[in-house]
Amino acid sequence: MEPNRCEEMMSAVFQNWLDMILLVDADDGRILSANRAAFRILGYRPEELVGKEFTVLFPKPDKTEGSSWHERLRASDAVFEYQEFVHADGSLCPLDVMAVLLDLFGRKTILVNLRDASERARVEEALRRSEERYRQLTECLTDYIYRVRVEKNCPIETYHSEACVGVTGYAPEEFRTDPYLWINMVHEDDRDIVRRQAGGILSGRDVAGVIHRIVKKNGEIRWVSNTPVPCYDGEGNLLSYDGLVKDVTDRVLGEKEQSRLVAVIEQTDQGVMITDARGVVQYVNSAFEGMTGYCREEVIGRKPSILSSGCHTREFYRDLWVTISRGDTWSGQIICKKKDGSIHHVQTTISPMRDEKGRISNYVSVRRDITQDLLLQDQLRQAQKMEARWPGESRTTSTTFLPRFWDTPNCCWTRYPVRDPPPGISSRSSRPPTGQRILCTRFSPSAARSPRNSDPSRFIPWFWKPSSSFGPRFPPRSRSARTWMRTAARC
């Protein structure tokens, strides 16, 4: 074949080759020639590429890559790798590169064959993303299955599913290479539990699932439930047992936190009642039982209206429900009736609880019995009235007569500041401090036994009588009591 004809054929092959081809001077690194595919794919015009240094095609951080090629070509005569080249518009083109050092017409030349790797890069990126999603999914899994193969009641092989990575941090290969990893990852305080479970399966006993702790590969301690299921052959011999390991850390910690909260509520001295959104009682604590006299079985499933004393109007309860139904907290005093029918005052705070959707699901009522507090406040107010009535004796006036009064069922004891006993009233005790007299009115035994007079509080002077909020006033009906009252009034 004629030389010119051969040269034309080689030139045609060079220009129409599907891959990009660049001829680079091995001495100065300048591009000698490029085929049409190189110009088309890289987006350069011939005058922008030919005669330029080969390093213009590399990203800025990789400008030294071209010179390193030259060194590697000297050592191996060929370079195969993946490289990103700069497109004419500034974007990066992923290319598979094959570079060979040739001697063309007595000149060291580098033949660079570039193949578009965009499709392969997209496939690799999709694969990388898929692996990342799989890794994230595996880490989110809270359970995995395992199988232990048994021969002659001895475990000989263990298989763990891929999801074990998310629960334990260990890969299935690590369980295969280390036959004791399954017990070594168990928390040292729980290993006896797991050993007894495995021993029970191998001995043919029915065993239940257990909850124990494991130490993950990263050192984190987690709670898991281990539920095994044995598999037997037709003759009853144990072939294997399959198991499900489930991460129950959140559940266990939640139950422990709930137990602590319940213990705190049970030990508090304030009554706690929890109802659903309709007002049906779901829970009461021990203090509530002692405060009302009702046991839990009598209250749960019913409505708080069983405590109604009849002392409040319908408007009172309607305003209460309107307040808590709109999500606000209600606080105030309620007069309630105990199981035995007695009345007591409670300071109550009712707060709504909302679910994850923001809807009211429960109401929590915390109550404190303030009956004695109100009684003491009323006694203090009456004592202040006494001091205002006899200002000269206020410092020596005693307001602690009630305990002594109750200790004497058929006598009316009190202390009030007089200089001498009133006429007709005799002293029944030793002489008190200066400025005071302890006066006693004696009633007949029949009067003391009378239901009308059996309550000593009926004979307390009016200025010591509790306020009407604790009940009606009882005027003294005994002649001796009326005489005593008239005498005390004159003094």
Image (cartoon, rainbow, N blue to C red):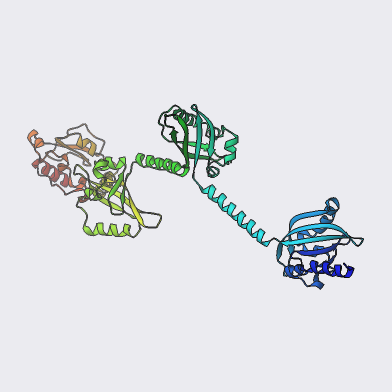
Q: Nearer the viewer, residue 328 or 231?
A: 231
Whether 466 is drawn above or below 230: the answer is below
Residue under the point 11% across and 43% down: 483
In the picture, residue 480 is in which quadrant? top left
- Residue 172 placement (x, y as % from top left): 57, 40
Quadrant placement of the C terminus: top left
- Residue 462 placement (x, y as % from top left): 18, 47
Q: Is residue 141 left or right of residue 36?
A: left
- Residue 158 placement (x, y as % from top left): 53, 35
| Residue 66 in sight from this viewpoint | yes
Q: Is residue 241 left or right of residue 103?
A: left
| Residue 189 in sight from this viewpoint | no
Residue extending farthest to the left is 446
Residue extending farthest to the front is 1
Q: Nearer the viewer, residue 337 or 176?
A: 176
Residue under the point 13% across and 42% down: 484
